Image: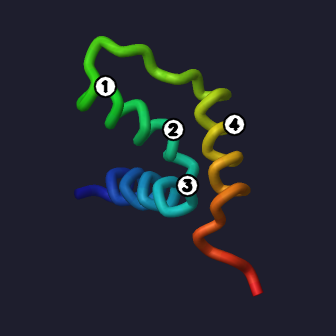
Amino acid sequence: MDTRGRLRTAWRLFREFSGERAYEIYVEHHQRTHPGEPVMSEREFWRRHIDARDTDPKVSCC
């Protein structure tokens, strides 16, 4: 793998670990497991994602 490929892989992993790819992962999963059903918009996904995190925090600070 060349340097460009390594950087692309590293960037993808960084985005995945930081949660930035959450919507992309949701869409991939939804299309694979529920073909033909509508997918939430990105705005709706993030709204629900943040609401769920606020109402049921799994990791707490301090």
Q: Which badge, 2 or 4, comes first in the chain's sequence?
A: 2
Front residue of 42 and 17 = 42
Amino acid carrying label 2: it is Tyr
Residue positioned most to the front:
55
- Which label sits on residue 31? 1
Disc 1 is placed on an element classified as helix
Residue for badge 2: 23
Give coordinates of residue 12: x percent, y percent: 43, 52
Please provide percent x and percent y for residue 60. Answer: 69, 77
- Write the residue at 76% across / 87% down: 62
Q: Residues within 10 Å of mark 3 (few under 14, many from 20)?
A: few
Judged from the image, the secondary structure of the residue bearing numbered disc 2 is helix
**Residue 47 circle label:** 4
Asked if marks 2 and 1 touch (Cβ < 8 Å), the reply is: no
What amino acid type is highlighted by mark number 1?
Answer: Gln
Callout 4–callout 3 Cβ contact below 8 Å? no
Disc 2 and disc 3 in contact, CB within 8 angstroms: no
Please identify the residue farthest to the bottom as the structure is shown.
Answer: 62
Q: Nearer the viewer, residue 62 or 2?
A: 62
The image position of residue 36, as x and y in percent, is 29, 12
Q: Earlier in the sequence, mark 1 or mark 4?
A: 1
Q: Earlier in the sequence, mark 2 or mark 1?
A: 2
Number of the front mark, 4 or 3: 4
Label 3 is placed on what type of residue?
Answer: Gly
- Residue 48 figure quarter: top right
Q: Which residue corresponds to the image point at 53% horizontal and 23% vertical from the top-left?
A: 40
Residue for badge 3: 19
Inter-mark Cα distance, 2 to 3: 9 Å
Hey, which residue is sitting farthest right in the picture?
62
Packing grade of label 4 (10 A; few <14, some 14-19, many >=20) is few
Residue at the image point whose x is 33% and y is 52% from the top: 5
